Amino acid sequence: MVNSPYDILFEPVKIGPKVTKNRFYQVPHCNGMGHRWPKSMAEMRGIKAEGGWGVVCTEECEIHPSSDLSSSTLMRLWDDSDIPTHALMVEKVQEHGALAGLQMAHNGFCASNRFSRIPQLAPTARATRYDDPMQARGMDKQDIKNLRQWYKNAAKRAITAGYDILYVYAGHNLTILMHFLASRYNQRTDEYGGSLKNRARLIREILEDTKEIAGDKAAVAFRFAVDELMGVDGIRCEEEGREIVELLADLPDLWDVNISNWDNDSLTSRFGQEGHQEPYIDFVKKITKKPVVGVGRFTSPDAMVSQIRRGVLDLIGAARPSIADPFLPRKIELGKLDEIRECIGCNICTSGDLLGVPIRCTQNPTMGEEWRKGWHPEKVAPAGSTDNILIVGGGPAGLECALTLSNRGYDVTIAEKEMTTGGRLNLEAKLPGLAAWRRVIDYRSYMLSQKANVNIYLDSELGADDIMDFGFQHVMIATGSQWRIDGVGRENNFPITIHDVDVYSPEQIMAGSIPKGPVLIFDDDHYYMANTLAEMLHDKGIEVIYVTSSDKIASWTENTLEQSKIQSNIINRDIRLIRNHFVIKARNGQFTLKCTYTGRERIVEAQSFLPVTSRKPNDALYNDMMSKQDDFAAKGIKSVTCIGDSYSPSTIAAAVYHGHLAARQLDEKKDLWTDFKRENTSKIMAKF
Ligand code: ADP
Ligand code: SF4
């Protein structure tokens, strides 16, 4: 690269005894694979290193069984037997010239210890983070000595595994070091409690211990949340957050700074923009002489350069941008900026960890599948034939399928009935806060526009007879889905009685219809649709009554770290909220609701009804095609496949994944849904 404005991003940076080749730093991030699926984890990290990240870190690593995070799956360094799983990751990362970092962690009363059954530890005896009926014990001096020793043991093992960077982690209020620091958790009266200096004593000791063990073999990073966004109740960047940085200024080799808790750190695009942490963390570099890394869902190289030039950061930290595009640094280096698959900030990735399964990503369908399916984000098997493919429907599934097929070298034609591609996202990206979701379409549309082997026909609604006569060898049906307006969903198995009530579908509201208020929104979906519509209608002056069959609004968004923010949005708008109820009848402005617990009924009055319950697949075209199966051979049709929401309505991530899978499936003998590698099982069983 000659005199690129982005050259500065490719400068090496010294971190203690190590040097990173560039400023692209994949900060620690969970992935749901960890100690249970270490080969999967190692392969995924290795691909990031291949994609150009100068530093690639693990997720949290439990340093001891008293910090057991079951049923989430993180890394473990409980004893020497864990070292090989780490060595594997280190090898994969260093193979590409990147530094490997380990996030050592003890989670104190925020560990579940459900597997190890050890009572949790806390600076002062207290309730645990989980709802489990148990308490954390207040640590005595011996416990503190033990904790220091566990950190030392883990650091020694990490050095043996070959790590370049060892983390001392107080990045979120989930870690024991943060618990000692925060006066609300630490009510000790000894030298580890009271003044800030005392509360920071354990951090200093562990930093010093770790540095001693690391010597010149590894750098020591300190990950610290400078602000908890809790006002006077928590650590604030202008007060204690700053004082800690002053106190420990040049002790660590690297400051990795962020804001707490995880939902603020990994803020979704619905609630914050790229670079949103800057006002909190920008003071750090003015205090320390050591390099500083921070995050902010950075996908724009200009924003990255600006962070460096303005002296905010030395290293561009990224978790989600590196998940959405493991090759982001390489693309910047090659000047292929339009080819960056930008993170949309939806946090589908965090759902893997929170649900105890491998990570997945809306933008990058290969994420989590690197080892078990052998999927690479930038490489795909060449076409096995010169067959032509027709894709009906240009939503997320159709576009991803087309792009992957075209990358394989197939000639692809997309027929889309609307005047534009984008499918459901044309409407959904207009919902409050979801504009960045449009990137799913923008990235694919741009990439397809560069392809000589792709034709897109808009305003082209196809029927089965058209398709039969076109002469394509393979047909992918990606015709999407529609929200139901008959109340059928989780609670109602059959259409409910609806008489003399104006009923609206989410699509109609998204397209601009304004219902007469009060409008009763029935959320049986528990994700983003009902609550974004409620916010939108309320903000247009329509009275909204929000009925949900769940205990909480948008309960599934616990997995995207958004639930409390969404519920706050509804509460702050004073929207009338009825939980644990579902609609069983809507007649003449009177809605009959039933309690999900007691079955007791009650009447609520409203003018209009907006059910957000479930979606029907648009599978009529596929079914029509399959009814003509006997004629396929005569027409030269070799396969017809239904993909995305028209196969089974789900998340956008699932539609993209299915589109990608279907494209790889073509002329592949294995069933790509079911036929994948599983870790260790056969070896373990062979011993018995
Ligand atoms: P998915 O998420 O599975 O991609 P979407 O609903 O987002 O589903 O997209 C489906 C797309 O298919 C929409 O853009 C829709 O206009 C288009 N479509 C539906 N039926 C037809 C058809 N018969 N011919 C062409 N395009 C269609
Ligand atoms: Fe970004 Fe969403 Fe992918 Fe997470 S799942 S990396 S937030 S696009």
Image (cartoon, grey):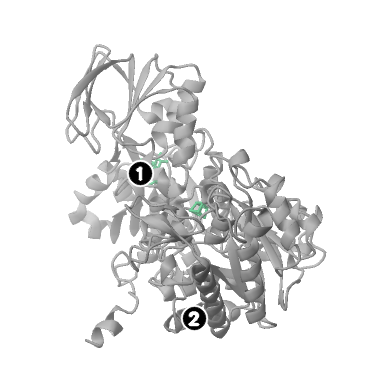
| Horizontal side of residue 503 vs 201, given as left or right | left
The quarter of the image that holds ligand 1 is top left
Q: Quadrant of residue 475?
A: bottom left
Query: What's the distance in space between the residues labelled 2 and 1, CA to CA?
Result: 43 Å
Which residue, given by chain and number where applicable, does mark 1 sit on?
A: 479
Q: Position of residue 418 (x, y in %)?
A: 44, 36
Quadrant for the C terminus, please. bottom left
> Do labels 2 and 1 touch, CB within 8 Å?
no
| Horizontal side of residue 24 vs 415, given as left or right | right
Disc nearest the viewer among 2 and 1: 2
Check the image and report above or below for 243 versus 592: below
Quadrant for the N terminus, please. bottom right
Disc 1 beta carbon < 8 A from ligand 1?
Answer: yes
Check the image and report above or below for 461 versus 168: above
N-terminal of the two: label 2 or label 1? 2
Q: Quadrant of residue 679?
A: bottom left
Q: Could you tell me the amino acid type at mark 2?
A: Leu
Q: Could you tell me the amino acid type at mark 1?
A: Thr
Which residue, given by chain and number where applicable, does mark 2 sit on?
A: 88
Q: Give the camera-side residue of 435 and 84.
A: 84
Farthest-out residue, bottom: 687
Q: Secondary structure at mark 1?
A: loop
Farthest-out residue, right: 3
Q: Give the camera-side residue of 58 and 331.
A: 58
Residue drawn at (43%, 39%), measured in percent from left and top? 424
Check the image and report above or below for 237 versus 289: above
Q: Position of residue 248 (x, y in %)?
A: 72, 62
